[in-house]
Image: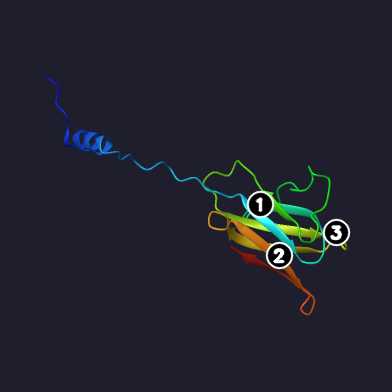
Amino acid sequence: MTRLFPAALLATGLLAFGFSPPAPAQAKQDFTLVNSTGYAFSEIYISPSKQNRWGEDMLASDDESMENGESRNIHFTGFNGVCRFDLKVVYEEDDSDAIWNDIDLCKVSKITLFWNSKSNVTTAVFD
């Protein structure tokens, strides 16, 4: 005669009622980048936070710039379980850049960038 242990009985009962154990959480890092700066970007880089180097240029495969008013869906893989990333954009006009560190891309799905002509600073709104 087969004997079921209490844990096996509980698991069997939960499955019978449609419950299943939670799947391991996977980070969702894809996001939409919106350029509302008034200027074009020639390069966009994404890198896990606290790394000493940037990943490859997200625009390199497109061989084009990201114009003002344009939105891009940024998609990348290979970083399961990583949520915190850094973002760098390079302006086409003068090769200056703007950097944001430690963005939680598991919680952010849209980043809109603005340039303030009075302060000469690029800011970001995270949604």
Which quadrant would the C terminus be assigned to in this image?
A: bottom right
The residue drawn where x is 67% and y is 49% is 74
Q: Residues within 10 Å of mark 2 (few under 14, many from 20)?
A: many
**Three-letter code for the amino acid on which mark 3 is drawn:** Glu
Which quadrant would the N terminus be assigned to in this image?
A: top left
Q: Is residue 7 left or right of residue 44?
A: left
Q: Residues within 10 Å of mark 3 (few under 14, many from 20)?
A: some
Q: Quick one: SS at disc 2?
A: strand
Badge 2 is on which residue? Answer: 113
Compare marks 1 and 2 and give the one earlier in the sequence.
Answer: 1
**Three-letter code for the amino acid on which mark 1 is drawn:** Ser
The residue drawn where x is 52% and y is 48% is 27
Q: Which label sits in the foreground, 3 or 1?
A: 3
Badge 1 is on which residue? Answer: 47
Horizontal and vertical percent position of residue 16? 25, 35
Placement of 120 over or under 99, stated as above or below = below
Placement of 108 over or under 77, stated as above or below = below
